[in-house]
Image (cartoon, helix red, strand yellow):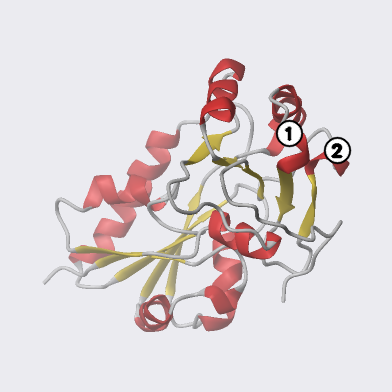
Amino acid sequence: MAGTLYGIGVGPGDPELLTLKAHRLLTTAPVIAYPAPDSGDSFARSIVADYMSPDQTEIPIIVPMRIERFPAKSVYDQAATTIASHLDSGENVVVLCEGDPFFYGSFMYLFERLASDYLCEVVPGVSSMMASAAAFGRPLAARNDVLTVIPSPLEDGQILEHLNSSDALCFIKVGRHLERVRQLIDKAGLLPQAAYLERATLPNQKIAPLADVKEAAAPYFSMILIYKGAENWISQLPLSGAAT
């Protein structure tokens, strides 16, 4: 019989935020696959490195981390072929995914290639959005608030439309778009309500009012949270924070 493919969310960075189910599957699977940059270490693997065994076969999925486009289809096609060979031999394969597999997660591209031919199970994980709200100390949304997740590469007009129509907002993929997004938030009159979070749950976590962030660009693992709904939430926002 063919093996089972598992896509597990490993959370935003703190190894203790791994779910019990993900831990069980991770420590018992003979094959572990994970996204990795073309230079440097895999962040997903680093989160769970202490739980892995030298006896496990590892499949790094090399995804170039660069501004210009790269042939992503061929990367996932090749990874799917490699994973399928292990599944065909009866081995279960666990694929690590930062945050949650189905919330902007890379695992979804393997799922669409393999789920029709193999047993597949998705194990949800703690997303960076949830972790950032917890680190900030302010709920994302409540009651009938509309929460909008905005990929920062969107065009200015689309971002302004969401800023004007939503009660709560989360900007992801901030990176090199930080300065442009900050100007749009200021234009919408929401800069005082915006919080900037960087590397949530990690020892070098940073939390600050967006208005106090002077950099023009942000690390890949950063986001902006805004709340303008009906709840009168008060949060003592520190200039910096450390994961606990």
In the image, is residue 183 above or below residue 48? above
Q: Amino acid at mark 1?
A: Leu
**Mark drawn on residue 27:** none
**Residue 186 percent across, percent down from the top left:** 76, 27
Quadrant, the N terminus: bottom left
Answer with mark 1 or mark 2, whichever residue precedes in sequence.
1
**Where is residue 93, by image quadrant?**
bottom left
- Do residues under tags 1 and 2 come within 8 Å of each other at their CB atoms? yes
Quadrant in the picture for residue 48 = bottom right
Q: Is residue 118 left or right of residue 188?
A: left
Q: Residue at x 68, y 24 (%)?
A: 188
Residue under circle 2?
A: 215
**Can residue 42 be seen from the camera position used here?**
no
Image quadrant containing the C terminus:
bottom right
Q: Residue at x 83, y 60 (%)?
A: 238
Quadrant position of residue 212: top right
How far apart marks 1 and 2 lie (CA) works out to 8 Å
x and y percent of residue 148 in the render?
A: 49, 39
Asked whether the viewer can see residue 233, the reply is yes
Above-or-below relation of 57 to 51 = above
Residue at the left extreme? 1
Could you tell me which secondary element the residue under label 1 belongs to? helix
Label 2 crowding class (10 Å Cα cut-off): few <14, some 14-19, many 20+?
few
Return the residue at label 1.
Answer: 178
**Residue 33's spot in the image, x, y percent?**
42, 63
